[in-house]
Image: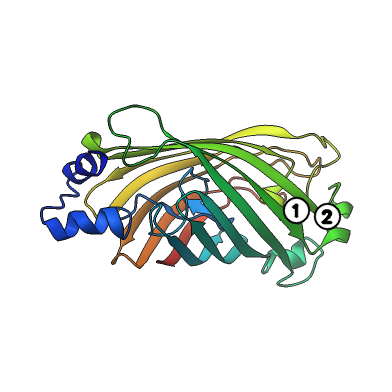
Amino acid sequence: MKSALAAAGLGLALTSPAAASEITTGGKLLLTGGVSALEGGAGGGLATWAVIAGNDTSSGIGGKAHATHVGVSDYSLRAAGVAVGLFDRVELSYARQEFDTGDTGAKLGLGQGFTFTQDIAGVKVRVLGDAVYDQDRWLPQIAVGAQFKSNDQGAIVRAVGGQDDSGVDYYVAATKLVLDKSLILSGALRATKANQTGLLGFGGDRSDDYKAQFEGSAGWLVSKRLVVGAEYRAKPSNLGFAKEDDWIDLFAAYAINKTVSVTAAYVDLGDIATFKDQRGLYLSLQAGF
């Protein structure tokens, strides 16, 4: 019943018996499992979703790998990672981020091309609902998770007012695909102390307390291969030396096939480490099974 509803909606028409069988035995609808977020798990580019990484359903194990580059006015960020989905219930992920200060590093007194590196290990558990196949009720798919983050520049983190070079984010996320409207909607609340998602450490001279921050995504499935939309991610501002702004993006994700997809976005990251109006392009390549 649920798979029949899914096959009927949003122009992802699965008209042949073979296509319907693929959905029930081999994988998820294209793009409904999200892409790879900057921190490694399945979601949008900036925001975490409740979906589990990989193309497989509850019958097996799936996974996803990604390489991402974000270039803004004065900085660049490189990220790469992998995520494994176990029976569409549990997700384990790992990502490494490299925040390259480029020419700005010299202006900050850090040195030309100074780079902060952060390792992120994540775990996510689906606790309720199914984002795609629960079309006969409004209940979204709900997941809880944690991300364990470690930064390699503890001395500099403390010099700018940060309290720690490692920390843990906790979140609860809800994601829903509304088939008859061709919409993907997702929201999450994240408890965090992270400065610039942890790239500038955790906690600060202004605050060392966990704060609940909202992150959300809305996407329109133009076709079975293309989704366009926007994201918003609120962030705390713990460091006295520099205000931290919320992040937004406008994105397009295209599934080349069931294995490979690409995401491009225009991002506005606001002020970062006293440098204002950090805007630019986000590009990510994902491969999954």
Q: Is residue 241 above or below residue 53?
A: above
Residue 155, image x, y percentages? 88, 60
- Comparing 22 with 10, the one in front is 22
Residue placed under numbered mark 2 in the picture: 157
Residue drawn at the location 54% of the way across and 54% of the way down? 91
Q: Residue 200 carries which label?
A: 1
Q: Quadrant of residue 285?
A: bottom left
Image coordinates of residue 83 in percent, x first then y, are 53, 61
Answer above or below: position of 98 versus 42: below
Residue closest to the eye, 59 or 252? 59
- What amino acid type should be assigned to the residue bearing mark 2? Val
For label 1, count other residues whose C-alpha is less than 10 Å away and answer few (under 14), some (14-19) or many (20+).
many
Residue 107 lies in quadrant: bottom right
Q: In which quarter of the image is the N terminus?
A: top left
Mark 2 neighbour density, 10 Å: few (under 14) some (14–19) many (20 or more): many
Q: In this view, does 21 lie to the left or right of 55?
A: left
Residue 53 image point, x, y percent: 47, 56
- What is the quadrant of the C terminus in the image? bottom left
Q: Label for residue 139?
A: none
Residue 272 in view in this figure: no
Say whether marks 1 and 2 touch (CB < 8 Å). yes
Residue at 24% from the left image edge and 44% from the top image edge: 3
Label 2: element kind = helix
Farthest front residue in view = 59
Side of 64 where 24 appears, left or right: left
Count how many numbered circles sit on residues in the image: 2
